[in-house]
Image (cartoon, rainbow, N blue to C red):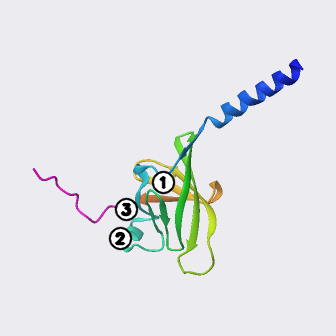
């Protein structure tokens, strides 16, 4: 009986320790919200290589997704985010699909984004075309 109790206790403790590295969030963190592109030309043209991240949306030329949950885990060079999304094809064909979105910060103004770690692509932040608002005194 003691052995069974110790095994259950050890299993419970180990499970809690393993799950402690994952933090669930409801949205994309603020530093990653904005327009991102594969290169500067795509930023200017708003072309095929451009994506837009908002707190609860992911939009690309191919798909429009609603973010259901974001999971943050520690990585060697900072946090790694995994978003669970529900998507519609931008062309209107087909139904809703559930997809993963991996976001790996790669330095100032840089992200790697993809559906899994095997197909991450490097993106750079697009500069906003609107001027910052000035506070009135």
Please check the rendered image and state whether residue 134 is part of the magenta-colored stretch, yes or no.
yes
Label 3 packing within 10 angstroms: few (<14), some (14-19), many (20+): many
Q: Count the numbered circles shown.
A: 3
Q: Which residue is mark 1?
A: 111
Q: Is residue 50 magenta?
A: no
Q: CA distance from mark 3 to mark 1?
A: 12 Å
Across and down, in percent, residue 74 comes to 57, 39
SS majority, magenta: loop
- Residue 73 appears in which quarter of the rendering? top right
Q: Which mark is residue 126?
A: 3
Q: Pick whichever of labels 3 and 2 is earlier in the sequence.
A: 2
> Label 1: few (<14), some or many (≥20) within 10 Å?
many
- Screen quadrant of the N terminus: top right
**Label 2 – label 1 distance at C-alpha:** 18 Å
User: Is 17 drawn above or below residue 72 in the view shown?
Assistant: above
Q: Residue furthest right?
A: 1
> Does residue 75 appear to the left or right of 109 in the view shown?
right
Q: How crowded is the residue under tag 2: few (<14 C-alpha within 10 Å), some, or many (20+)?
A: some
Dot 2 corresponds to which residue? 44
> Residue 16's quadrant in the figure?
top right
Q: Where residue 127 appears, x then y in whole percent?
A: 33, 61
Tag 1 secondary structure: strand
Residue at x 49%, y 63% (from the top left corner): 58
Location of residue 109 in the rendering, given as x and y in whole percent from the top left corner: 40, 53
Write the start and end of the magenta stretch as one range: 126-137
Check if mark 3's residue and mark 1's residue have beta carbons within 8 Å.
no
Instruction: Write the residue at 40% across / 50% down.
Output: 30
Residue sitting nearer the eye, 51 or 57: 57
């Amino acid at each position: 009986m003691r052995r069974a109790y110790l095994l259950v206790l050890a299993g419970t403790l180990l499970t809690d320790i393993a799950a402690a590295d994952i933090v669930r969030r409801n949205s994309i963190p603020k530093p990653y919200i904005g327009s991102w592109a594969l290169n500067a030309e795509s930023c200017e043209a708003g072309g095929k290589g451009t994506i837009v991240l908002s707190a609860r949306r992911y939009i690309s030329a191919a798909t429009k997704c609603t973010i259901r949950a974001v999971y943050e885990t520690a990585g060697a060079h900072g946090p790694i985010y995994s978003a669970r999304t529900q998507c519609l094809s931008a062309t209107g064909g087909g139904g809703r699909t559930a997809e993963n979105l991996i976001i790996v910060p790669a330095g100032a103004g840089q992200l790697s984004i993809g559906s899994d770690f095997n197909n991450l692509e490097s993106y750079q932040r697009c500069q906003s075309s609107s001027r910052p608002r000035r506070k009135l005194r």
